[in-house]
Image (cartoon, rainbow, N blue to C red):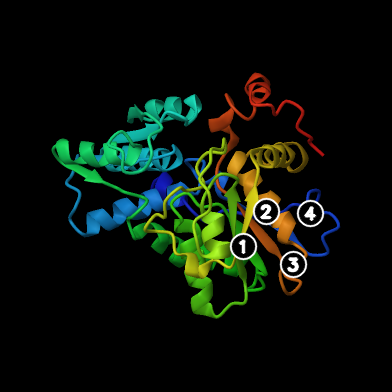
């Protein structure tokens, strides 16, 4: 009968009939929040461990070390539980308390770092690298640079979308944290010769939209949406397979996340709102009349203390968010 890991992937594609009303083409949501660990990162967590085991990089009972915004850590926690590994997750302090609690409940050792920039020894990726060097039997899963990340989206997520849309996919829209999702799906579509427009949904303050649209990283800023956006280019982000970028504010991302919950019954987080808001903006601009697919990256339960908490929203000037 296998284990819970056998149920990663194969997520449903559902129409957004209310939010997409009047578009003249289908607006669809790829429900990655319905993976067992609640996010698309379950796919890469399993793929990275499978790859490390095949290459003999992980000894039985070893320790996985990951720098994570939370979702990859939760995916790795599932894999660690089933396969008998220990897990250390390093998170920057800006990530929600909900994620920290979930990781601890799943048996992970949680290390919280300052919100330090890349290259600073206090940065969460740098701390994860140091811990992997110091801990006996540790393996750095390294989602930002490990090629198993985009590879699983090229061999699994992309083909799923192709099959679910009968190859008539006009556009696919997603945020980028490591860049693995867009890179893998984009490479699959390019290999098929598909005319699909691959769209980056980027939070305002991330530098990636500038890279895609103008060939140079944009200005660096702060934003509240978690799990997507970059100030430096991760090795797993291949901008050559991304055709468009749309910048979305925190307010619009969170408002759309609330709409997805209340109007479509989809219990998702802020980055899903970013993707759907971006999909609406490009709906009348992409060629053809095929469907536009937005990737819903993760579940709402890891943001209850933030974007689903009225007091937190009020503190950030987001108390009067529209829901229709």
| Residue topped by disc 4 | 20
- Answer few, some or many: residues within 10 Å of disc 1's Cα (few below 14, many 20 plus, some between 14 and 19): many
Element marked by disc 2 = helix
32 relative position to 81: left or right = right
Image coordinates for residue 36, horizontal then vertical, percent: 49, 43
**Which residue is outermost to the top?**
311
Element marked by disc 1 = strand
| Closest to the observer, 38 or 95 | 95
The label nearer to you, 2 versus 4, is 2
| Residue topped by disc 3 | 285
Q: CA distance from mark 1 to mark 2?
A: 10 Å
Q: CA distance from mark 1 to mark 4?
A: 15 Å
- Answer few, some or many: residues within 10 Å of disc 4's Cα (few below 14, many 20 plus, some between 14 and 19): some
Is the residue under label 4 in contact with that under label 1 (CB below 8 Å)? no
The label nearer to you, 3 versus 4, is 3
Residue 84 visible here = no
Q: Residue at x 64, y 26 (%)?
A: 316
| Residue topped by disc 2 | 278
Q: CA distance from mark 2 to mark 4?
A: 12 Å
Quadrant for residue 71, please give it.
top left
């Amino acid at each position: 009968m296998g284990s819970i890991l056998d149920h990663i992937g194969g997520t449903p594609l559902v129409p957004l009939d209310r939010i997409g009303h009047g578009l003249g083409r289908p607006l669809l949501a790829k429900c990655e929040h319905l993976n067992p660990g609640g996010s698309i990162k379950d796919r890469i967590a399993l793929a990275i461990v499978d790859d490390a085991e095949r290459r003999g990089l992980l000894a039985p009972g070893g320790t996985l070390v990951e720098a994570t915004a939370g979702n990859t850590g939760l995916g790795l926690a599932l894999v660690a539980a089933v396969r008998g590994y220990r897990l250390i997750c390093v998170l920057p302090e800006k990530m929600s308390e909900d994620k920290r609690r979930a990781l601890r409940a799943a048996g992970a050792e949680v290390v919280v770092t300052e919100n330090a920039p890349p290259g600073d020894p206090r940065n969460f990726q740098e701390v994860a690298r140091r811990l992997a060097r110091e801990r006996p039997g540790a393996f750095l899963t390294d989602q930002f640079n490990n090629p198993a990340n985009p590879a699983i989206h090229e061999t699994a997520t992309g083909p799923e979308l192709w099959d679910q849309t009968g190859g008539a996919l006009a556009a696919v829209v997603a945020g980028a944290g490591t860049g693995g999702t867009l890179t893998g799906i984009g490479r699959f579509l390019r290999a098929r010769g598909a005319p699909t427009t691959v769209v980056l949904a980027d939070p305002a303050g991330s530098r990636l939209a500038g890279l895609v649209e103008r060939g140079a990283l944009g200005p660096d800023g702060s934003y509240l949406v978690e799990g997507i956006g970059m100030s430096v280019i991760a090795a797993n982000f291949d901008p050559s397979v991304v055709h468009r970028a749309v910048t979305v504010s925190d307010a619009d991302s969170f408002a759309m996340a609330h709409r997805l919950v209340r109007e479509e019954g989809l219990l998702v987080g802020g980055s899903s709102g970013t993707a759907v808001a971006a999909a609406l903006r490009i709906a009348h601009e992409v060629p053809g009349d095929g469907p536009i697919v937005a990737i819903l990256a993760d579940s709402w339960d890891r943001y209850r203390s933030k974007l689903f908490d009225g007091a937190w929203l009020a503190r950030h000037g987001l108390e009067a968010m529209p829901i229709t």
